[in-house]
Each structure stands twice: as C-alpha cells, then as structure tokens.
Image: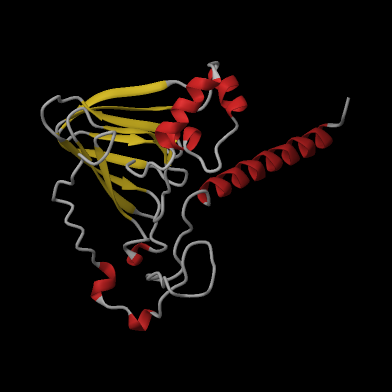
Amino acid sequence: MLPLTKQLTMASSSSLFLLAALLALASWQATAYDPSPLQDFCIADMKAPVRVNGFACKDPMAATPEDFFNAAMLDQPRDTKASKVRSNVTNINVINFPGLNTLGISLARIDYGPLGVNTPHIHPRATELLTVLEGTLYLGFVTSNPNRLFSKIVKKGDVFVFPKAMIHFQMNLAHDKPAAALSSLSSQNPGVISIANAVFGSKPPISDDVLATAFQVEKDLIHWLQSQFWGNTNY
C-alpha cells in the first residue's frame, strides 16, 4: 500500500489533470463561434485583396454612419410565388451589410405563402432564434443520433430556438393566408445547407449507387429526384 503522502500527491495530480481538461474543453467551446472582435468595429472591405477568415477591415477613420445602416425594409412582405416551396428568405448578413463583420450576428426574414415551407436545412456556423411575426407555423429541429425530433406549433409573438448546426424547418399551416418570421443568428455569416438540395442537387451529383443504397430505393427514383433539383434556383 502506498504511503499517505504519495496517495495525496497522486490525487492532487489527478485533480489538476481533470481541471486542465475541463478548462481546455471550455476554451474550445468558447472559440467554437465567430471570434470576438479585437477593436470597436471592423467594417468589411469587400475589395481588399487580403484573404482572411472573414473579411479584412476598412480603415476605421474612413467609416461613416452608413456603414452601420442597412435599408433592408424587413417590414415589407416578400413574394413567395416564384418558389416551388412557397417561401422566401431575405438574409441580412456580412455579404450585404459589411458593418456586421466580426460582430457575430445577422438577421433573416422568412416569408411563407399558404402552406409554404422553409425546407429542412442547417446553419453550420450559427444558432437561430426565430420570432413569429404573423401566422401560425409548424416547426422543429432534429438532433444528432439518435435523431430525436423537437417540434411545436407556434403563433404570432412566439419565439423558438434552433441549436447550432441542427437540421430544422418551418411550415405555414394556413391554407389561405401568408405567414412571416424574423430570425436572429449568432454569426455574421451563418451559411445554409438545404438538405434536399445538397443531397439531390449537388454538382457534380452524388453517385446514384450511394443514394440508392442510402435511401433503400431504386435508381430510377433517385434519377427522378435529382431531376427536380438540377438547375433549380428557387430555394
């Protein structure tokens, strides 16, 4: 049996190792989202030749109030008739609002026609907080394995959160009137991967052998599904 002092030393070392591991994990989690700004602001310079993770900064002395403003008209409904899925997403992110660069936030207005759907998709870099502006929506998200679905029917004024990188969706339940929502996202550039588009509309296409095996269907059905997405820009 080890002496008491030796046991205490080993226990202390184990505790320090555990603490170091927890701190490392916490540090990794802290850097898993958009990095924190190192200055008051960093207006994106879209014409800069420098390639960085994000966008290079415009000279802060050249910044004006217009750099922090976007006449987005998010109070105005958008047309949903041109979309096969009867929805229209208006994104306000660093691409069209350079003042958001390094600030870790963006917005999106989602308009839904009658029975319109914002189809299953993920934002690889952001958590999404959705507020219903008008109408009644059925929405939800699916976790990683074992793929549990969390869904709910929400109404005007309700708020629902979609955790980062979870597959999620919304649908307008009304047959005869539109709906709308406003989403806040925890990234200046959340990105979006629409599941159906990615699987059946990728360029070049995913092998039909792979898809037929994955979905356990005949290749003819895979070819038909792919034909619905190739060249489609209405999603």
- From where the camera sits, is residue 143 visible? no
**In the image, is residue 7 above or below residue 24?**
above
Q: Residue furthest bottom?
A: 61
Left or right: residue 72 compared with residue 222: left
Q: Residue 47 location in percent, x, y?
A: 43, 74
Numbered disc total: 0
Q: Residue 107 location in percent, x, y?
A: 29, 51
Q: Residue 111: which quarter of the image?
A: top left
Q: Residue 100 location in percent, x, y?
A: 35, 62
Q: Residue 87: which quarter of the image?
A: top left
Instruction: Identify the image quadrant of the N terminus.
Output: top right
The residue depicted at 62 percent of the width and 47 percent of the height is 24
Q: How is the image coloured?
A: secondary structure
Q: Residue 170 location in percent, x, y?
A: 29, 31
The residue depicted at 21 percent of the width and 27 percent of the height is 115
Q: Residue furthest right?
A: 1
Left or right: residue 19 compared with residue 123: right
Pick the residue in front: 145 or 47: 47
Instruction: Identify the image quadrant of the C terminus.
Output: top left
The residue depicted at 16 percent of the width and 35 percent of the height is 179
The residue depicted at 46 percent of the width and 66 percent of the height is 55
Pick the residue in front: 176 or 141: 176
- From where the camera sits, is residue 15 visible? yes
Pick the residue in front: 139 or 127: 139
Q: Residue furthest left?
A: 176
**In the image, is residue 100 above or below residue 179?**
below
Left or right: residue 59 compared with residue 207: left
